[in-house]
Image: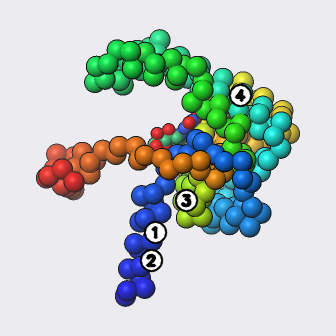
Amino acid sequence: MSEQYDLVEATMKVIQDRRSIRHYTDEPVSEEHLDLILEAARQAPSGENAQPWRFIVVRDPDTRKQLGAIAGGGSGRRFTAEFVTEKMQERFSSLEDEAKKKAIFEKLTSGRVSAFLADAPVSLVVCGRKDVWDLPYDTSAAIENILLIVTALGLGACWVIAPCIDIRDEERIKDLLGVPEELKVISIIAIGHPLRPHRPRPRLPLNELVYSESWDSPYYQEES
Ligand SMILES: Cc1cc2nc3c(=O)[nH]c(=O)nc-3n(C[C@H](O)[C@H](O)[C@H](O)COP(=O)(O)O)c2cc1C
């Protein structure tokens, strides 16, 4: 029983400690760690056990630089779209400091948010078979496994979708890495040794998320 509880505690700790890491040291990720990361991905659930995921491990600095540039471009365009449609202003409406708000908008629209990808020693490119219906769900399960084992190993990772949102960027990645037509590039996972600890991002309380039996009855009455 106590062994079981230790496992629950250790698992919960990994889940709670995971955060998106965007700054890395130069230390490479070892083969041994990469093997564990890829094995964790392979063990993920998938609809009809289709296992549609395929992975490309990119360590070459020049290729990573090109992926980082594509990620920066995708990120900049996405946030510019959020800015011009005023979605971004809505998202930050509670922030009263106008100078701070302007700085955030500038940073987001600049693309710098995702260009960090070039600095991670490993870019794990997650691709998947286009003919599998559950592809986005399947690959998301594999990616979460990757993020959790990375955390358990004391490494850091960030799920980066920015270079894959725009079909033109996806084509650039496919050309760069020789990805076959029948596969889709889903996301890139940046992996490395964290430069510094990261603060946790806020989470909504459970009483805003969970209902009991039907939508009109909250599962939790109090903030939890
Ligand atoms: C589907 C998905 C796509 C994401 N894409 C990006 C991205 O393109 N660039 C980036 O810097 N972070 C990206 N992230 C990381 C999120 O910004 C991050 O998970 C969120 O802010 C919560 O922070 P945390 O992961 O530290 O808890 C993505 C996360 C998910 C789940």
Which residue is found at the position 60% from the left and 42% from the top? Answer: 23
Q: How much space separates mark 3 and mark 4, taking CA atoms? A: 26 Å
Residue projecting furthest to the top = 84
Residue at the left extreme of this rendering:
221
Can you give x and y, in whole percent of width and height, for residue 136 in the image?
Answer: 58, 45
Res. 42 visible in picture: no
**Dot 1: what SS?**
helix
Mark 3 vs mark 4, foreground winner is: 3
Q: Nearer the viewer, mark 2 or mark 3?
A: 3
Q: Is residue 217 visible?
A: yes
Q: Which mark is residue 70?
A: 4
Where is residue 73 drawn, in percent x and y?
66, 23
Q: Earlier in the sequence, mark 2 or mark 4?
A: 2
Dot 3: few (<14), some (14–19), or many (≥20) neighbours within 10 Å? many
Q: Residues within 10 Å of mark 2 (few under 14, many from 20)?
A: few
Asked if the residues shown at circle 1 and circle 2 are in contact, with their CB atoms under 8 angstroms apart, the answer is yes
Q: Name the mark on residue 7.
A: 2
Say which residue label 1 marks.
11
Ligand 1 neighbours mark 4 (CB distance < 8 Å): no
- Where 32 falls versus 2 (above or below)? above
Q: Which circle's residue, 3 or 4, is located before the other in the chain?
A: 4
